[in-house]
Amino acid sequence: MLYIFHNIEINVTVKPVRAMRLTVRPTGEVCLSVPLGVSTKEIAAFLEKNGSWLDRTLDKVRQKQLSSNLPQYVTGEMHLLWGKLLPLNVLEERGRESVAFYDDEIVMYCHADRDVAGRKKTLYQGYYRLFRPVLYAMLHKWCDKLQVEMPDVTIRLMRTEWGSCTPRKNRMTFNVDMVRLPKDCMEYVVIHEFTHLVHPNHSAAFWALCDSRLREVGLADSKTMRKMIRKTIGS
């Protein structure tokens, strides 16, 4: 049978097994095996308990799917910027390489002999310059709002996470790829990491506080925001 959990479709199969088993296939399909006689209430409780694991695993599957079709950074290729797909226009440049971002396209000026890795590096240097001031404005906003000290911030390309927080050192790291997300999703990640300063885990108290802060600024709850992120990156 098909079970819907926080907008995630789960294929539930009743089997002669001893315990419930949740799996995510490489295609992103979510499957749950349950023993005979298990009630819907018990299934719901099991999924709530394993919800964080499911979200993380689905995010990793999505990232792996994207990486299997690696971009070449050539003219005509579509790239995300603030949640919107824009065409990339690559122009030859003999001097200093650069990137310009417009409402309807991304223009990258680079040397004619640049390989894929070099073009990617040039584009991400542009992403970094665009992303950093927007991120810091958002960080200052939440520091003022929460009356907390500005964290020690690192921006880099991360493979599986949008952000991380080390509360005891007041240190946060953010993925430069957040520049590809809608700004509401970016703010969700910032709020998520600030909430870790209070709750260093993903307990029920963490999610309650995170969702409360999201509501304060008119954003949807955490689960909806994570779904929006997956939908954007998968587009």
Image (cartoon, rainbow, N blue to C red):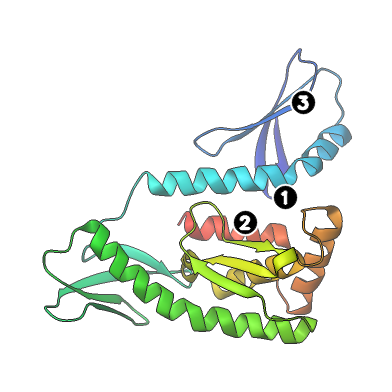
Q: Which residue is disc 2 drawn over?
A: 227
Q: Which residue is disc 1 drawn over?
A: 6
Taking 20 as reference, is 224 above or below it?
A: below
Q: Residues within 10 Å of mark 3 (few under 14, many from 20)?
A: some
Whether residue 154 sits left or right of residue 206 in the image: it is: left
Whether residue 106 sits left or right of residue 38 in the image: it is: left
Residue type of the residue flagged with mark 1: His
Q: In the drawing, what numbered circle is on residue 20?
A: 3
Q: Secondary structure at mark 1?
A: loop
| Whole-number angstrom distance, CA of label 1 to CA of label 2 | 9 Å
Callout 3–callout 1 Cβ contact below 8 Å: no
> Which residue is nearer to you in this view: 16 or 204?
204
Callout 2–callout 3 Cβ contact below 8 Å: no
| Whole-number angstrom distance, CA of label 2 to CA of label 3 | 24 Å
Indicate the position of residue 219 as horizontal and vertical percent values: 70, 73
Of circles 3 and 1, the one toward us is 3
Callout 1–callout 2 Cβ contact below 8 Å: yes
Indicate the position of residue 156 as horizontal and vertical percent values: 48, 65
Taking 31 as reference, is 63 above or below it?
A: below
**Image quadrant in which the C terminus is located:** bottom left
Q: Earlier in the sequence, mark 1 or mark 2?
A: 1
Taking 185 as reference, is 203 above or below it?
A: above
Residue 58 in view here: yes
| Residue at screen point 62% across, 56% down | 227
Taking 108 as reference, is 147 above or below it?
A: below
| Residue at screen point 62% across, 74% down | 152
Q: Earlier in the sequence, mark 2 or mark 3?
A: 3
Q: Secondary structure at mark 2?
A: helix
Indicate the position of residue 91 as horizontal and vertical percent values: 16, 75
Q: Secondary structure at mark 3?
A: loop
**Image quadrant in which the N terminus is located:** top right
